[in-house]
Image: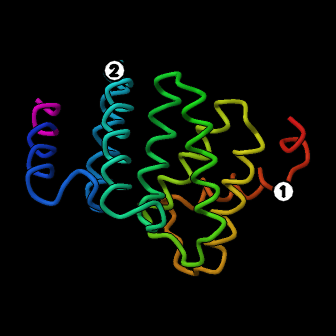
Amino acid sequence: EAEQVFRECLDVVRNTVGIEHPRAAKLLTAYCEMLADLGRPEEGVTLISEALTASEQRYGKAVPWRLRLISVGVISAVNAKKYEMASALGEQALASLETRVQPFGRDEGIDLANMAHKLGDLSDMTLCRKAYGRVFALNQRQNDLEELWTDNLNFGGSLAEHKFYVDA
């Protein structure tokens, strides 16, 4: 039943603002997670690939909200065992993080911390460390971090500082 609701929501999004719209990322995140839980992560990869292509065509690659789609793409690609795709998207995310100056919103921060964690699942500790370090640094200035993801960022911050993980 939940999948049917997601599909209906996705149809509404496609027929109104478009799958590439920044607010569609929240729907895509939840839907891709559900598809992975159902054992069909490849469908999530297809969906995110469609959204990334549409986003690039409509807005270009430099828009800040594209980062959230990329982070969901990394998670979906790792879930689908498409590791080369996940690494390539991780590199895109890092390039985008390098130019980012504004702190993240709660949902975006959670998505990015989850992305960093998934990069660790790839055993690509360099990407993982860089992603956590950048997310942590951007939000260190932000005083209103919510407890929901503070623990994840604290783990990521310590991960970014420990040489053991750098050399792994």
Is-magenta flag for residue 2? Answer: yes
Residue 28 lies, in percent from the top left, at 30, 45
The one of 60 and 49 positioned closer to us in this rendering? 60
In the shown orientation, is residue 152 left or right of residue 106? right
Label 1 element class: helix
- Looking at the image, which residue is at 73% across and 35% down? 124
69 vs 103: above or below: above
Classify residue 44 as left or right of residue 168.
left
User: Is residue 90 left or right of 4 when viewed as pictured?
Assistant: right
Q: Tell me if mark 2 has few (under 14), some (14-19) or many (20+) residues whose alpha carbon lies within 10 angstroms of its own.
A: some
- Residue 132: within the magenta? no
* Tag 1 residue: 161
Q: Secondary structure at mark 2?
A: loop
Give the magenta-colored segment's residue range.
1-6
- On the image, the x and y values in percent for residue 57 come to 33, 55
Q: Amino acid at mark 2?
A: Arg
Q: Position of residue 89 (x, y in %)?
A: 55, 43
Quadrant that contains the N terminus: top left
Amino acid found under the numbered disc labelled 1:
Glu
Point out the tag, 1 or 2, that comes first from the N-terminus: 2
Q: Which residue is mark 2?
A: 40
* Residue furthest to the front: 57
Nearer to the camera, 29 or 140: 29
**Residue closer to the observer: 13 or 161:** 13
Q: Residues within 10 Å of mark 1 (few under 14, many from 20)?
A: few
